[in-house]
Amino acid sequence: MADTPKTAKLTIADKEFELPVLSPTAGPDVIDIRKLYAQADVFTYDPGFTSTASCDSTITFIDGDKGELLHRGYPIDQLAEKSHFLEVCYLLLYGELPSATELEDFEALVTKHTMLHEQMVMFFRGFRRDAHPMAIMTGVVGAMSAFYHDSTDISDPHQREVASIRLIAKMPTIAAWAYKFSIGQPFVYPRNDLDYASNFLRMCFAVPAEDYEVNPILSRAMDRIFTLHADHEQNASTSTVRLASSSGANPFACIAAGIACLWGPAHGGANQACLEMLREIGTVDRIPEFIERAKDKSDPFRLMGFGHRVYKNFDPRAKVMKQSADEVLGLLGIENNPTLQVAMELERLALEDPYFKEKKLYPNVDFYSGIILDAMGFPTAMFTPIFALARTVGWISQWKEMIADPQNKIGRPRQLYIGENARDYTDVEQR
């Protein structure tokens, strides 16, 4: 016998309305309010949409209380430990882990698309030399629709697939060239004999006069940073991509919109803010002072890189990222880097402090990724572009899922209007 469908009852004045309750694979039940306006002539009010499901999805699931992050059902710590970024890309895009042959073919396909259209070199040179790399990335990715006309028709499944591969493949080149341009160095072209992460590091740090030998520890750490940031459910930038996509915009415009949203310091700038905080602390002997400030509710100072808005227990990505941080710092050393010395001591003291234990303010992925990127030699301005590079596959996966969804309709949030009522226009002489 089939289960009786769940419903919720809403009473407004003397009228009662019955709303369907949907049960997900995991997570809380969801009250379906799609017909609420038509039936009851009311909207719901939810600033930030924090209690609203805007879509159904099979890609990523987060349980903040348990500290759980799943991609297609696979725990993120297992993927980061045992897999690598391009395999995770395949998983996010197609729903299952690839066979050995499928993975080899996918990696080859991505590798063959890493070059940028040569005329885009002139587009880069149109920016001011001191332009922020995120400004360059937003502009260049949006401009890809002007260079790759054969993959902008979202109604064509083949063109959607080509656009997906192009974006994943070319984003490291775009990010690396944005960095090179900002520091006045020549562009370094990708090499097909290198893996995804190694290719990116080489394009960032090689120069024509001297090639860059990629250390496997650094390459593995970079690959993990990509993997751990690949997707994170319906966050602000992903929701931006979906909202832009709902209008039928081409994929390059939609991903550019996601990059622009990620640029906001409340979203993609967390690891940069963390490193800036470490530099503000300056020296190890000042750490106790800042820890006490963090405990003082009357002090606006907060320890960046500790705790997480979504994860109320611990960030499941942080454990693997800490392992990479230890490996990178073991390779490069921190003896002559006061910022990294502060980071390591702050981590130790915070993990031992009863206050932080009680509040579950553990170091998160942004704390460790910022340390790693700084140790590798990246300026803080490149932290968010690297985040955007990694998150591209998540945005594309969400975009593809939305385009194929028969329930897809253009996004149109409502509002609680609290402005003036209708009034007559008054001529300027009479005001």
Image (cartoon, rainbow, N blue to C red):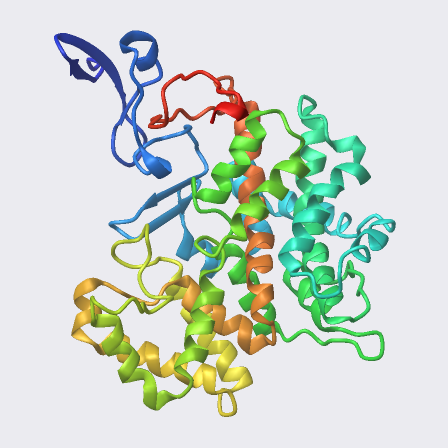
Residue at 71% across / 55% down in the picture? Answer: 174
- Residue 326 to residue 334: above or below: above
**Is residue 320 toward the left or the right of residue 83 in the image?**
left
Number of dots carrying numbers: 0
Locate residue 337, reporting x and y percent.
51, 87
- Nearest the viewer among 17 and 371 is 17
Residue at 57% across / 53% down in the picture? Answer: 388
- Nearest the viewer among 249 and 315 is 249
Residue at 27% across / 77% down in the picture? Answer: 291
- Nearest the viewer among 191 and 137 is 137
Task: Work out whether residue 19 can be spotted.
Answer: yes
Q: Residue furthest left?
A: 14
Q: Quadrant of residue 152?
A: top right
Q: Quadrant of residue 56?
A: top left
**Is residue 154 toward the left or the right of residue 129 in the image?**
left
**Is residue 310 toward the left or the right of residue 212 in the image?**
left
Residue at 27% across / 84% down in the picture? Answer: 288
**Is residue 161 toward the left or the right of residue 426 in the image?**
right
Locate residue 195, reporting x and y percent.
68, 60
Task: Work out whether residue 321 can be spotted.
Answer: no
Locate residue 81, reporting x and y percent.
45, 61
Q: Quadrant of the N terminus?
A: top left
Locate residue 376, reporting x and y percent.
58, 75
